[in-house]
């Protein structure tokens, strides 16, 4: 049995006191975006006209910023962000193929990808370890 794999995976996350809590919350947010992207539009609340692209950009920026908060290794962070961008593109493709009243929109996919880049840019701010500081504070 290869013992290096679990140790390597454990080093992907920053040294949190409760790593599985934060990873679980982030994974839940990713799953929520997937579900919201694939349900019929009648199941979703309406958004003000002209804000659809902003909604995509902000949603994916928050997911990528969450990845910045979670992952300590550059390779892990970049892999998560590439996966988020590909997920955004793939979900747009699926929307066009599923026949549930949604259409594929390349501008949505672009907004998703730009959102990932914006969230990734938080890596270069002093807020990149905000969750780690919060998690490791003593009561």
Image (cartoon, rainbow, N blue to C red):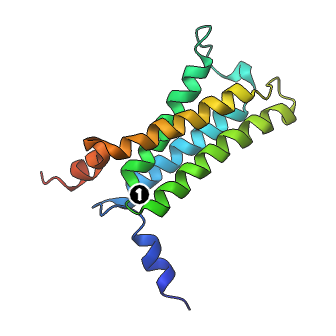
Apparent side of residue 27 relative to residue 15 in the rendered image (left or right): right
Percent coordinates x, y for residue 4 in the rendering: 48, 84
Percent coordinates x, y for residue 13 in the rendering: 39, 62
As displayed, is residue 131 above or below residue 91? below
Percent coordinates x, y for residue 121 in the rendering: 41, 41
Residue at image coords 79%, 37%: 93
Tell me the SS state at disc 1. loop
Name the quarter where the N terminus is drawn.
bottom right
Mark 1 neighbour class, 10 Å CA radius: few under 14, some 14 to 19, many 20 or more: many
Q: Quadrant of residue 102?
A: top right
Residue at image coords 43%, 60%: 74
Apparent side of residue 87 relative to residue 124 in the rendered image (left or right): right
Q: List the single residue furthest toward the top.
A: 49
Residue underneath mark 1: 71
Q: Nearer the viewer, residue 116 or 136?
A: 116
Total numbered labels: 1
As displayed, is residue 58 above or below residue 128? above
As displayed, is residue 119 above or below residue 67? above
Residue at image coords 79%, 29%: 104
Q: List the single residue furthest toward the bottom.
A: 1
Residue at image coords 30%, 64%: 15
Apparent side of residue 130 relative to residue 25 in the rendered image (left or right): left
């Amino acid at each position: 049995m290869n013992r290096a794999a679990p140790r390597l995976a454990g080093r992907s996350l920053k040294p949190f006191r409760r790593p599985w809590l934060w990873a679980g919350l982030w994974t839940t947010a990713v799953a929520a975006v997937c579900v919201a992207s694939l349900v019929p539009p009648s199941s979703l609340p309406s958004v003000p006209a002209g804000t659809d692209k902003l909604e995509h950009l902000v949603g994916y920026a928050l997911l990528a910023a969450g990845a910045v908060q979670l992952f300590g290794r550059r390779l892990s962070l970049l892999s998560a962000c590439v996966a988020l961008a590909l997920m955004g593109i793939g979900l747009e493709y699926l929307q066009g193929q599923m026949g549930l009243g949604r259409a594929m929109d390349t501008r949505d996919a672009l907004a998703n990808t730009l959102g990932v880049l914006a969230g990734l840019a938080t890596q270069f701010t002093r807020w990149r370890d905000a969750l780690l500081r919060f998690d490791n504070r003593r009561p």
